[in-house]
Image: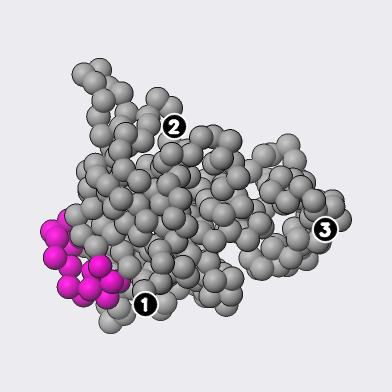
């Protein structure tokens, strides 16, 4: 049996409230094998994004991890101090956030941000080598004239292109695990499909493991092998994509499916459904 890359066991994350600590994540367990794509789905407030942030040890203060293990390549990240985590983030685990415009620094060019990211995790890299890597990853995510676009600022890109830049930043140092937290939330349907297709292509090409966080089951089905459904801080159902979509057992899973508009005669998780509003980028 292949050893797990990420194995989260009984994770608990709490935040202080007026009457004491309240658990936002209540004993959640999930795993990701090398090269596997896992989806975590649920509505806003279900605890899915907090679970992802906990893996990165980025839970906003005064929230904190109050229980469980986060085993990455056999090491418990929950026991790491901040200095140790800085050697993991970006280099071994990277994250793509919901809003690329707020994640990118508006005062620096795309090239500066990519070069600085590469050199932060590869101190021995020269600026020229880091620039070459920046061009390489921009080309990987489908940005044309990558060398020229290094001098562009974030506001000069569309929303979909900014999200591609964020993905380029995330893969620049060849992490083993990519966490995508609602990466399509601010995008229209056509661009959502393109971003999901891009993640699927990068997973195949680079051998990435992917943890995809979303409220949209149809998008998750396009890229993921297995799915965990979260509700009020708990995993209420999990299984293979086909089982979750064709044979959902929990009423909450069925409710999530019913929330998504359908196209008559097209299976909801098919590429045709996702690209109905326009062509999906190859």
Q: Secondary structure at mark 1?
A: loop
Residue 164 drawn in magenta = no
Give the labeled residue for mark 3.
129
Residue drawn at point x = 40 percent, y = 25 percent? 62
Residue drawn at point x = 59 percent, y = 71 percent? 206
Q: Which mark is residue 60?
A: 2
Label 1 vs label 3, nearer the camera: 3
Query: Is residue 193 in view?
Result: no
Q: Identify the image's colour scheme: rainbow, by chain, secondary structure or one colour.
A: one colour
Q: Which mark is residue 270?
A: 1
How many numbered circles are shown?
Answer: 3
Spot occupied by residue 113 in the image (x, y as percentages of width and height): 72, 46
Residue drawn at point x = 33 percent, y = 68 percent? 226
Mark sitting earlier along the chain (3/2): 2
Give the spatial CA distance, label 1 vs label 2: 36 Å
Give the spatial CA distance, label 1 vs label 3: 40 Å
Q: Is residue 233 left or right of residue 101?
A: left
In the image, the segment drawn in magenta is: 239-255
Circle 3 crowding by C-alpha within 10 Å: few under 14, some 14–19, many from 20: few
Label 1 vs label 2, nearer the camera: 2
Residue 107, above or below 243: above
Circle 2 crowding by C-alpha within 10 Å: few under 14, some 14–19, many from 20: few
Name the outermost residue toward the top. 18
Mark sitting earlier along the chain (1/3): 3
Spot occupied by residue 114 in the image (x, y as percentages of width and height): 72, 51
């Amino acid at each position: 049996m292949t050893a797990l890359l990420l194995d989260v066991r009984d994770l608990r994350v709490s935040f202080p409230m007026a009457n004491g600590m309240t658990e936002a994540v209540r004993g959640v367990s999930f795993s990701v094998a090398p090269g596997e794509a896992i989806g975590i789905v649920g509505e806003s407030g279900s605890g899915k994004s907090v679970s992802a942030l906990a893996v990165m040890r980025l839970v906003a203060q005064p929230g904190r991890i109050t229980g469980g293990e986060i085993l990455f390549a056999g090491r418990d990240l929950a026991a790491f101090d901040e200095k140790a985590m800085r050697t993991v983030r970006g280099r071994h685990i990277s994250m793509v956030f919901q809003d690329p415009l707020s994640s990118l620094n508006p005062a620096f060019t795309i090239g500066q941000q990519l070069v600085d990211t590469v050199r932060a995790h590869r101190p021995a890299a020269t600026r020229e080598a880091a620039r070459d890597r920046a061009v390489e990853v921009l080309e990987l995510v489908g940005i044309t004239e990558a060398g020229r676009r290094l001098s562009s600022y974030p506001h000069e890109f569309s929303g979909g292109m900014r999200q591609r830049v964020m993905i380029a930043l995330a893969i620049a140092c060849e992490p083993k695990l990519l966490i995508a937290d609602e990466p399509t939330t601010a995008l229209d349907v056509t661009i959502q499909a393109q971003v999901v297709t891009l993640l699927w292509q990068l997973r195949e090409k680079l051998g990435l493991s992917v943890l995809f966080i979303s409220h949209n089951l149809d998008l998750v089905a396009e890229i993921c092998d297995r799915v965990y459904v979260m509700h009020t801080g708990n995993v209420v159902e999990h299984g293979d994509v086909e089982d979750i979509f064709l044979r959902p057992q929990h009423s909450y899973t069925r409710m999530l499916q019913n929330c998504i508009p359908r196209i008559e005669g097209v299976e909801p998780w098919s590429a045709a459904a996702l690209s109905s509003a326009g062509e999906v980028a190859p």
